[in-house]
Amino acid sequence: MNNPRRALTVLVAVFLAGCLVGAGTDHLLGRRFAARGGDAQRSGRAGGTDRLAAVLQLTPDQQIQLKGVYDELRRQLDSTRREMGEKFDTVRARANERIASMLNPEQRKRFEEYLKETRSREEPYRRGGDGGERRPRSRQ
């Protein structure tokens, strides 16, 4: 890959694919733990801290410190997800503009319809702007 722009595009694509796989895994694991009948705390990430505290045999003070570390990590990850989502949207918008610029008016109309359908399918999977939980998926 002698072209730096192409290398950057491939790097971004691989990174975004990893993000999607990670989000999907997170979603599936959350459903799996919830299906086991765990309470809300156990079906989320809090169970991981409890388990780690038990494995490490942490003192109560260390458990509080560990919770602080995980809380800060969660805030940083949420912020990073929002930033990456914005960057992803910008990259996708640029690509859509480039595609639209090469189309004739009829194709452009069909492309806009395609994008509208795609956005409506993706909407249930998008996170809210406040970093909230994923919206529930509707079964059809």
Image: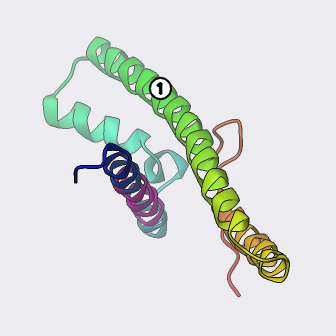
Report x, y in % for residue 35: 47, 70
Residue at 56 percent across and 34 percent down: it is 83
Badge 1 density bin: few <14, some 14–19, many ≥20, Cα 10 Å:
few
Residue toward you, 91 or 139: 91
Q: Amino acid at mark 1?
A: Gln
Left or right, 59 with reference to 5:
left
Q: Main secondary structure of the magenta part?
A: helix
Report x, y in % for residue 75: 51, 26
Report x, y in % for residue 117: 76, 76
Query: In this figure, which residue is indicated by the disc labeled 1?
Result: 76
Label 1, secondary structure: give it: helix
Residue at 44 percent across and 21 percent down: it is 72
Image quarter (top left, top right, bottom left or bottom right) of the N terminus = bottom left
Q: Residue furthest left?
A: 56
Residue toward you, 48 or 75: 75
Residue 15 among those drawn in magenta: yes
Which residues fall within the magenta stretch?
14-28
Q: How many marks?
A: 1
Residue 127 among those drawn in magenta: no
Left or right, 83 with reference to 62:
right
Image quarter (top left, top right, bottom left or bottom right) of the C terminus = bottom right
Q: Residue furthest top?
A: 61
The colour style of the image is rainbow
Report x, y in % for residue 16: 43, 53
Residue at 80 percent across and 72 percent down: it is 112
Q: In which quarter of the view is residue 53 placed?
A: top left
Q: Residue furthest bottom?
A: 140
